[in-house]
Amino acid sequence: MKLAPHLHRLGNDVVASYLIDLPGGITLVDAGLPGHWNDLQHELASIGRPLSDVRGLVLTHGDSDHIGFAERLRAETGVPVFIHAGDAHRVRTGEKPKTPMGPMRIGPLVRFAAYGIRKNAMRTRHVHEATEVQDGDVLDLPGSPVVIGMPGHSPGSIAVHVPAADAVFVGDALTTRHVLTGHEGAQPAPFTDEPAEALASLDRLAAVPASWVLPGHGAPWRGSPADIAAAVRAAGDTRR
């Protein structure tokens, strides 16, 4: 789905990843679930670009619902996959600490699980080879993505700022749709390793100049990163 010039979403409000379409090639941010491979093919066909135009895939973190088709893309096309060093072990092994599920409602939980089944979530492959990045890196990919460290949801969670798309991609540093409760609006994401650290990282997001904030779950946010950071903080305060 086209959101704006150069900017496309794969998936939906349940699980989303993104495509940046520029004359010099395509950069992907996150890989959703394995079944989103077909969404990628359809989106490329809709804009008249071949798979060979994809130059790189940047992962916001190493959780399974963000790495879905990453290994297939890498293995079949040689496209490099980038991950923050703090999540390198997670993306290669799937190992992560157990976190409290927190509040949930049966309906949204069942819909999340059912969507995962439809998109082959149980067939997610770990990424065998990934290029490690660090906070502040500017990647040699279309749009010159800037890596912004956002630890908290996981040690290597990042935001990815692409000025050419006027967008910052935040993975699970926040959410606009809670996958376990169905609650919509800017709020902290569930399954977060270190909730206090994740809230502190919002200071870094607030300083980013962009008009789109794009989470891995929930509707795109059309507005400033500072505004959504404040909204997430407020929502987090009400949960304490």
Image (cartoon, helix red, strand yellow):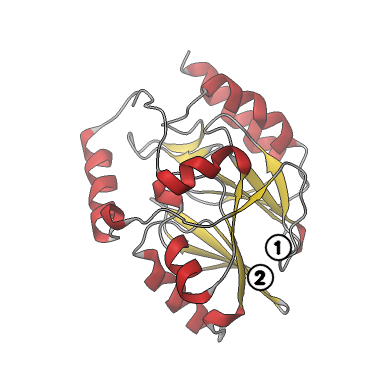
The tally of labels here is 2
* SS at badge 1: helix
Is residue 166 shown left or right of residue 30?
Answer: right
Q: Is residue 179 above or below residue 163?
A: above
Image location of residue 95, percent across then percent down = 40, 37
For disc 1, the neighbor class at 10 Å (few under 14, some 14 to 19, many from 20) is: many
Residue type pointed to by label 2: His
Pointers 2 and 1 in contact (C-beta within 8 Å): yes
Q: Could you say which quadrant of the image residue 167 lies in? A: bottom right
Query: Can you identify the residue that label 1 sits on?
Result: 165
Q: Is residue 102 above or below residue 43?
A: above
Image location of residue 163, percent across then percent down = 76, 58
Q: Is residue 79 above or below residue 115?
A: below
Q: Residue furthest top?
A: 240
Residue positioned 64% across, 33% down in the render: 229
Residue type pointed to by label 1: Ala
For disc 2, the neighbor class at 10 Å (few under 14, some 14 to 19, many from 20) is: some
Residue 6: mark in rendering: 2
Residue 47: mark in rendering: none
Task: Decide which of tag 2 and tag 1 comes sooner along the chain.
Answer: 2
Q: Is residue 6 above or below residue 167?
A: below
Q: Does residue 224 appear in this view?
A: no
Is residue 40 shown left or right of residue 152?
Answer: left
Residue positioned 54% across, 17% down in the render: 237
